[in-house]
Image: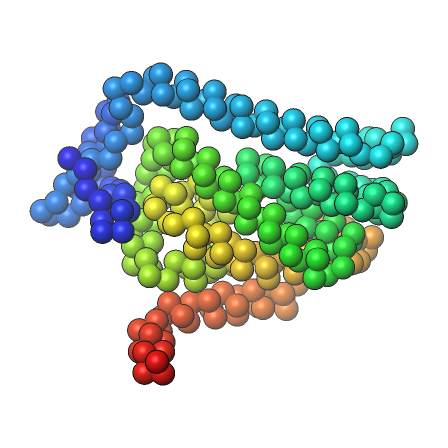
Amino acid sequence: MFVSSGDHSIATPDTKEQINENYISVKMNENVSTSIQLMNPQSGRIKRRHFAILLLIFLFSILSLCTVYILFPKIDTADKEAFKVPKTIDDAKILGNILYKYSKHHRYIIMIAFFLTYIFLQTFAIPGSIFLSILAGFLYPFPLALFLVCLCSSLGASFCYLLSQLFGRHIVLKYFQTKVSLWQKKVQAHSDSLFWFIIFLRLTPILPNWFINVCSPILDVPLGPFFAGTFAGVALPSILFIQAGKTLHQLTSPSDVFSWRSMLMLGFCAILSLLPIRFKDQIQNFFKKQS
């Protein structure tokens, strides 16, 4: 038996009673039990097909990055070693200097490369996007850098969302069943204010961003509020990294971005994002009276 809510959200387990090849049998409460399908009888063939499609998507993404690299202006031999995703602040400093040199005459190809690389890292949950946010502050004016980082973050997160929706259901339910069960209840409780809920999650370290990306489609969070909430929610942390990029050569580690003042500001904004959720009924009544 399959049970779903009126919002088409999946029924996830409160307690796990039985797991077999095809279903997770669960007890939702004293009177209602249900099961979540992990695979269908043709799961082997479907898994192979999904893996092939996922591999093609990954290879296409790599091909896109390679195409941009080929279209790059001629790079000095001494600079080629620096063209890699930065893993340390020192890598970011070296890459920033080289990109700044080439961006004077090749602004748009540098921007396209930045755009595609950032989305690629976010889509496949590969570390390194923090350093790209810092580089955005070093290379571009503040408004443009903030827009680029927020857009790349939300697009990459949305592509990760779609990949999880297509291929990740079985894996997520198999390895994160308890967490999915817990957050299913929270999503249902805030189903009419998911935009603000996503902003709150992006502002706080309660859940890692990759987990939010892969679990949101499983919990039936609509893509619209997910994209918009991500765009708005990553803005404030991105401001800190972009501002740090303005003084890139003074940084010694990514932790230098955060001070007590910035942490308090993030916490304050996280609390503000909860206010529309807490007072949603009063806000709705106010606008009804106004109209």
Residue 193's place in the image compared with 28, above or below, is: below
Image location (x, y in percent) of residue 162: 45, 39
Residue at the (65%, 31%) spot, across then down: 64
Query: In the visual, does 98 lie left or right of 60?
Result: right
Camera-side residue of 96 and 115:
115
Residue at the (38%, 21%) spot, across then down: 47
Q: Quadrant of residue 238?
A: bottom right
Residue 157's place in the image compared with 50, above or below, is: below
Q: Quadrant of residue 144?
A: bottom right
Q: Residue furthest left?
A: 31
Colouring mode (rainbow / by chain / secondary structure / one colour): rainbow
Q: In which quadrant of the rendered image does the C terminus lie? A: bottom left
Specify whether residue 55 is in view.
Answer: yes
Image location (x, y in percent) of residue 278: 36, 70
Image location (x, y in percent) of residue 228: 49, 56
Q: Quadrant of residue 87?
A: top right
Specify whether residue 96 is in view.
Answer: no
Q: Residue furthest bottom?
A: 290
Residue 137's place in the image compared with 124, above or below, is: below
Query: In the visual, does 86 lie left or right of 62?
Result: right
The number of discs equals 0
Image location (x, y in percent) of residue 226: 45, 52
Q: In which quadrant of the rendered image does the N terminus lie? A: top left
Camera-side residue of 38 and 285:
285
Residue at the (41%, 71%) spot, across then down: 275
Residue 98's place in the image compared with 233, above or below, is: above
Residue at the (57%, 68%) spot, across then down: 264
